[in-house]
Image (cartoon, grey):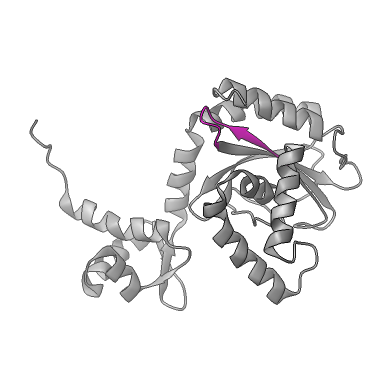
Amino acid sequence: MKERAGIQSVEVGFGLLDVLSRSRGPLMLRDLAAAAGMSAAKAHRYLVSFQRLQLVVQDTGTRYDLGPAALKLGLASLSRLDAVKLARARVADLMEDIGHTLALAVWGNHGPTIVHWEESPQAVTVNLRLGDVMPLLSSATGRCFAAYLSKDAITPLLKDELARAQKQGRRDVPATLADARAMLEEVRKRGAARVVDTLLPGIVGFCAPVFDSDGHIALGMVALGPTGTFDPEWDGAVDVPLRAAAKRLSRDLGWHG
């Protein structure tokens, strides 16, 4: 079958976006160009156009990173996944049952990423946005994903976050890798993750995993609210319906665990 004609310059330029999507942070021009296999001068011409389209942004240190248009495209793609589609259709009823703000998160290039947000009318203001990447140790979302991803995939990320926490002198997260693993074992035992006054002062959060037909975590269903009105107890008014909703969705996706 004859290969259809395309626009080669678009395909070449996409190499830069692909490198940025796999990078763990912004890159200098020389490093970005080298990773994409092109000269710095050629890469710069593409980056000028990508900046105009807001696919790429440049910080004051002349490093390049993905821009808001790239985030918008990524979130649109993630929201079209079957698991997210099904979950979004059920969030309103679940929020009415629980009475608190709900969110959906998937595993993105940089970690657990918020892709849907359903705010309760009684919600307090929470400084979280679509596209935010949640920390592994101090958020219920991060703990949930860390508990159910493979050890090989998650261990390097846990070590990085533990090192940052130690530098910051944090005492509200595990101090060692062994402590972190014990915490994640507790998440698996409970079937959900919980934080109280950890990531956000005065806020309780639960996250329950949703599994696909292969038993892999497909997304996290998150509930959060203020300590004064949000039930923080295991087997309580939030934990039970949240985990039940996540299990129903998992079954609908073909999971038989």
**Residue toward you, 169 or 174:** 174
Is residue 52 among what the camera can see? no
Looking at the image, residue 129 sits to the left or right of residue 198; the answer is: left
Image quadrant where residue 208 sits:
top right
Q: Is residue 220 magenta?
A: no
Q: Quadrant of the N terminus?
A: top left
Number of numbered markers: 0
Given the current orientation, which residue lies at the most extreme right position?
228
Q: Nearer the viewer, residue 145 or 3?
A: 145
Residue in the image at 65% along x and 46% along y: 147
Q: Magenta segment range?
A: 207-216
Q: Is residue 208 magenta?
A: yes
- Asked if one can make out residue 112 in the rendered structure from this viewpoint, the answer is yes
Which of the image's four quarters has the C terminus?
top right
**Left or right of residue 42, residue 35 in this image:** right
Query: Residue 83: percent from the left, percent from the top?
Result: 54, 30
